[in-house]
Image (cartoon, helix red, strand yellow):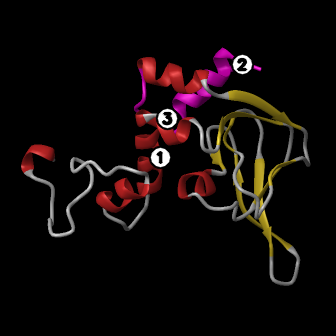
Amino acid sequence: MRPTAADRRIAEASTFLEGIGGAALEEIIARASVRSFEAGRVLLRQGDPPPRLDLVLPGAVKVWKDSPSGAPVTIHQMGSGQLVGCVAVFCGINLPATATAIEPVRTLAWPGGGVTAHHTALTMARARHLLDGSPYPISDVARGVGYTDGQYVLNPKQEQLPNSQL
């Protein structure tokens, strides 16, 4: 299923795709598929490799994991415009929690290692998403999302980027 005009508006307004426009945004959205989940259905399961990155369209998702006693503990509730599975996709780890549809939900989905690893605009969105509230310097985040270019990554002996790159 292809994204509707309403789906595109939600994607464009999301903090994840904020600042991306024109042909780059069109390419990113074109590479996504729309997925639907009934209430109670698991979108992503804790411990699995991340199969995709989901941007919630209409609906709500509960992110939870089992406590040491085995009781489920809700970590986060996500709604329209929020990303599900981003920690695992961006950091290259198995899913740290399970995501379940609270109500019928649709998502805009990209393969876990697909466009998110190859498209410059999405890589920068990924870096910006990781930086939100992060105590780490931009050079560490840039290195973590795969940039090795000196424009984004400081030499270990360099304390700041040259003025021409600020």
Q: Residue at x 77, y 62 (%)?
A: 46
Q: Is disc 1 placed on a helix, strand or loop?
A: helix
Circle 2 sits on which residue? 2
Horizontal side of 34 relative to 145 (left or right) equals right
**136, above or below 54, in the image:** below
Among numbered discs 2 and 1, the one appearing first in the sequence: 2
Residue 18 appears in the rendering? no
Of labels 1 and 3, the one closer to you: 1
> What type is the residue that disc 1 sits on?
Arg
Of labels 3 and 2, the one closer to you: 2
Which numbered marker is on residue 17?
3
Circle 1 sits on which residue? 126
> What type is the residue that disc 3 sits on?
Leu
Among numbered discs 3 and 2, the one appearing first in the sequence: 2
**91, above or below 59, in the image:** below
Magenta region includes residue 39: no
**Range shown magenta:** 1-21
Q: Residue furthest left?
A: 163
Q: Is disc 3 placed on a helix, strand or loop?
A: loop
Tell me if mark 1 has few (under 14), some (14-19) or many (20+) residues whose alpha carbon lies within 10 angstroms of its own: many
Q: CA distance from mark 2 to mark 1?
A: 23 Å
Q: CA distance from mark 1 to mark 3?
A: 9 Å
